[in-house]
Image: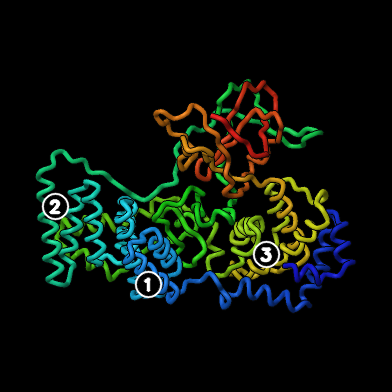
Amino acid sequence: METLKAAIPENLKRAIGDSDVDDLRSTCSSLHRFFLHFHPFHQMITELADPKYALCAKNKDAALKSRLLGNQCFSNADYAKALDCYTQALREAPLDTASDMESNLVVATLYINRATVLHKMSLIVECLRDCTRALQICPSYAKAWYRRGKANASLGNYKNAICDLNVAKSVEPSMGGKRQIEGELKILLDQCKSTTAVEQIQHTENNCNTVGEMPHIKLQRVSTPDKGRGIVSSCVISPGFLVHAEEPYAMIILKQCRETHCHYCLNDLPADRVPCILCSIPLYCSHQCRIRATGQMFKIYPEYNGFFKNLPSDLGEYAAEVIQCNDSELEIGDITEHKHECQGVHWPMVLPSEIVLAGRILARFLLNIPPEDIINFVERLELSHCYKQMSSERKLDSHIYAIVLLYCLQHSCGIMFSIDEVFISQVVIIISQIKVNCMTVVRLKSIDAHGLSGRFGEFPFQSGAHSTSNVEQVRVGKAIYKAGSLFNHSCQPNIHAYFLSRTLYLRTTNVVAAESQLELSYGPQFVRL
């Protein structure tokens, strides 16, 4: 990007630095014309957005190398390193490409390799989930059923374990393998007889859904000379009252959290993290988060229908229930935030997070609304912006990134639209809107050794722990909350913002008088509990 900036004529830089909103079409047109005749610009767009140059595409050879390294680490009992290697192999391994069953078997094998490591590390629930994922790819995989049975037995789910091992015995092709499974079944049946009233424990996918209190108070939008738009209540509100809950209009994970947090719900990643099916960029905490982010619904191939029919009726029903996950029950929006980025191209990795977030906002527009309606779309966002107050350097950056982003989206969205001064100027406004309205999504983390926070920021009681704990906010993502952006800042706030998964919650911290503005602190907060 510095190459582009350095090549721009000084008089054009000055014009952009001195520009106001009314000048945007002129400055955007001039910069666009310059780039159209500047070869390095076209070369950069090709490298960022052309699938031929994709650095984040699936790569079977790379996956096999990572698997080999994982096997070596497993042989050396370095299970933590083996876990990382198998996870990396899963990120790189292609899946479901033109019904390539050989590639899909590689992925299923990788899940079982990782499941074996997880079992060795006593992460049994995670092991069970990986076994199920392998079976969703290859239902007739005997080793996956066997490993799933062992995991269920470790969890005390003896009924399911017996069913798993019986399916494994039915699909195991070798006589030696069948005898081994029969031996395991005998041991398991003996354990089951000696155990009474064993409760079947269900261990399903991670779920980012949160069922919480919903606000039951009417808020009003106001406009004041000193702070502009704001929110007030028509009645007195007591402390601790939930006044607002909202899902994000658009969200992006911060670059430093890509390997540690789910790219959809932004919660901590478990040991059995789930990769994207079509590229190697995101990691998710669950199959459900991947579906919501990408729209990638896993399909059982028709040729596997015979697999269920060849099993005894009771086992066939059990196997179908295990494998055919309830994807249809998931609510998926019309726009899935990662789908337009999911071609292995690396512009979503290279461009700043705020620019990729702008791309997600634009993707909602391009996939639903005619491109010529861009002005109305930006107006309907109803987000304030600060273009006039931006520094000359930021104005120049926003112009450059707006043009680069539009060309990347033209490659990725599969929609042809005219990139002109009108479109570019509106993207510059969106970028300036993000700078003003973007909220930093945080997770709470204990600084000392006591009371470490849970996945949603809870603080579990520990016997003998100190009564106070220093807690800091860890920044994990950025998001646009359209209604949430209406709440103004105050150094003496009367509401507090917190996040459960992707949802923003605003709750009063003290009594708020009728007709008083509800205000929060935009800065980081350090809490002592």
Label 3 sits on a secondary structure element that is: helix
Q: Name the residue: 82% across, 61% down.
A: 25
- The answer to which quarter of the image holds residue 172 is bottom left
Numbered mark located on residue 188 in the image = 2
Mark 1 or mark 3: name the one nearer the start of the chain: 1
Residue 300 appears anywhere in the view: no
The three-letter code of the residue at mark 2 reads Leu
Specify whether 411 is left or right of 449: right
- The answer to which quarter of the image holds residue 112 is bottom left
Label 1 sits on a secondary structure element that is: helix
- Give the residue pinned by disc 1: 68
Closer to the eye: label 2 or 1: 1
Between residue 143 and residue 83, name the one nearer to us. Answer: 83
Specify whether 62 is left or right of 419: left
Mark 2 or mark 1: name the one nearer the start of the chain: 1
Residue 506 at what x, y percent from top left? Answer: 58, 34
Between residue 100 and residue 143, name the one nearer to us. Answer: 143
The three-letter code of the residue at mark 1 reads Leu
Quarter in which the N terminus is drawn:
bottom right
Residue 498 at what x, y percent from top left? Answer: 56, 37
Distance in Å between CA atoms under marks 2 and 1: 33 Å
Distance in Å between CA atoms under marks 1 and 3: 38 Å
Residue 62 appears anywhere in the view: yes
